[in-house]
Image (cartoon, rainbow, N blue to C red):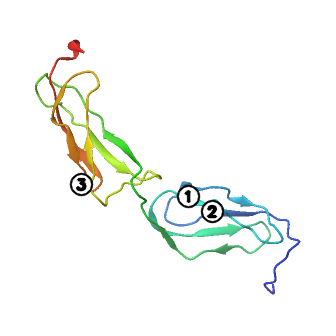
Amino acid sequence: LGGNLVKAATVQVSAELTSAGNATALHGKTLMSPALGVYNYTDLNVNVAATGYKLAFTSPGLWGVTTTAFSVLVGPAHHLRLEVAPAGGVAGRPLTTQPSVSVRDLGGNLVTTGSFVLSARLLAAPVFGAVSATTVSGNATFNLIVNTPAADH
């Protein structure tokens, strides 16, 4: 009740996200045992960009504590993700469904800042059209034409 550190504490404390609508975004070791009454969380991370996150720390029989709200920002570009897979068409004509690719950070968040030039190539046949596309708000859509029928490759 007096707020003194209890160095002999042995109870475990659990950490969880309580806000921003995505509890599955918290990763790392969320259940800790104390070292001289102190709980050092060293690998907690949140991989979904959002505002209004709060962490709650609880243990049965003890009063819990909740952090003030904080934000997680989108990180730097890390990988590409296929958003729309290409669909067939007629040789010499644009594909029926053009591929769309997005730029993502390590957590899978859409990277909307910056501009990236992406290239496409078909591994089994010549491809023409817009074989490179520049991202707009993290997304790039191609305009591809396959030059030969599928039986040729």
The quarter of the picture where residue 143 lies is top left
The quarter of the picture where residue 132 lies is top left
The one of 126 and 24 positioned closer to us in this rendering: 126
Residue 16: which disc? Answer: 2
Q: Where, quadrant-wise, is the C terminus in this rendering?
A: top left
Residue 46: which disc? Answer: none
Q: Which sits earlier in the primary sequence, circle 2 or circle 1?
A: 2
Q: CA distance from mark 1 to mark 3?
A: 30 Å
Query: Element under label 2?
Result: strand
Q: Which sits earlier in the primary sequence, circle 1 or circle 3?
A: 1
- Residue at the location (46% across, 52% down)? 106
**Relative to 40, is 101 above or below?**
above
Q: Which sits earlier in the primary sequence, circle 3 or circle 2?
A: 2
Are the residues tagged 2 and 1 within 8 Å (C-beta)? yes
Q: Where, quadrant-wise, is the N terminus in this rendering?
A: bottom right
Q: Amino acid at mark 2?
A: Glu
- Residue at the location (13% across, 31% down)? 94
Q: Whole-percent x and y of residue 23? A: 55, 58
Residue 136: which disc? Answer: 3
Q: Amino acid at mark 3?
A: Val
Name the residue carrying label 1. 23
